[in-house]
Amino acid sequence: MIVRLAIALVIFYLAYRVGKYILRLPSENSRDFSGSRGEIAGEDLVRDPQCGTYVPVSSAVKATIGGETLYFCSEECRDRYREAVEKRKRQRYDDRKE
Ligand SMILES: [Zn+2]
C-alpha cells in the first residue's frame, strides 16, 4: 500500500516537472518569430508564382495573365508561367471537346 502511494507520488512529481517544462518552452521560443514579415525597408515583396522567389515590387516583372496581375523575378519566369497557364487552358478546352 505504501509502495503504491510512493509510485503515485513519483508519477505526480514527474507529471508536474514535465508540465512545467512544456509550459516554459513557448515563451522562450516565440520571441523572434513574430517580427519577421516579407518586407525589406518598407518595400512590399511579391511572390513569383513560377519559381517561388520573393521579389521587391519595384524590380519585379509585372504581367497580367488570365485577368490576374502577377509579378515575376524575370521575363523568363513570366513567359514560362504564361505558357503553363495557356497550356492548362488548352487542356481544359480539349477535355470539354471529348
Ligand atoms: Zn522566377
Image: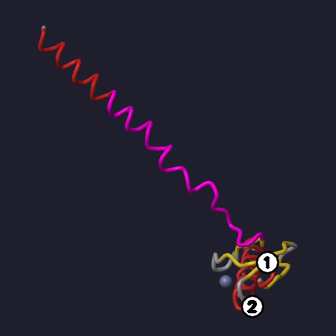
Quadrant for residue 17, please give it: top left
In magenta segment, residue 41: yes
User: Pointer 2: residues within 10 angstroms few (<14), some, or many (20+)?
Assistant: some
Q: Residue at x 83, y 78 (%)?
A: 65
- The amino acid marked with disc number 1 is Val
Expressed as whole percent of the image width and height from the top left, the position of residue 16 reads: 34, 27
Magenta-colored span: 16-42
Which of pointers 1 and 2 indicates the residue nearer the eye?
A: 1
Q: Residue at x 78, y 72 (%)?
A: 43
- The amino acid marked with disc number 2 is Glu
Q: Pointer 2: what residue?
A: 75
Q: Pointer 1: what residue?
A: 57
User: Pointer 1: residues within 10 angstroms few (<14), some, or many (20+)?
Assistant: some
Left or right of residue 22: residue 66: right
Could you tell me which quadrant the N terminus lies in?
top left
Expressed as whole percent of the image width and height from the top left, the position of residue 78 reads: 74, 85
> Regarding mark 1 in the picture, which secondary structure is present there?
helix
In magenta segment, residue 31: yes
Q: Nearer the viewer, residue 60 or 19?
A: 19
Q: How is the image coloured?
A: secondary structure
Which residue reaches farthest right? 67
* CA distance for labels 1 and 2: 14 Å
Could you tell me which quadrant the C terminus lies in?
bottom right
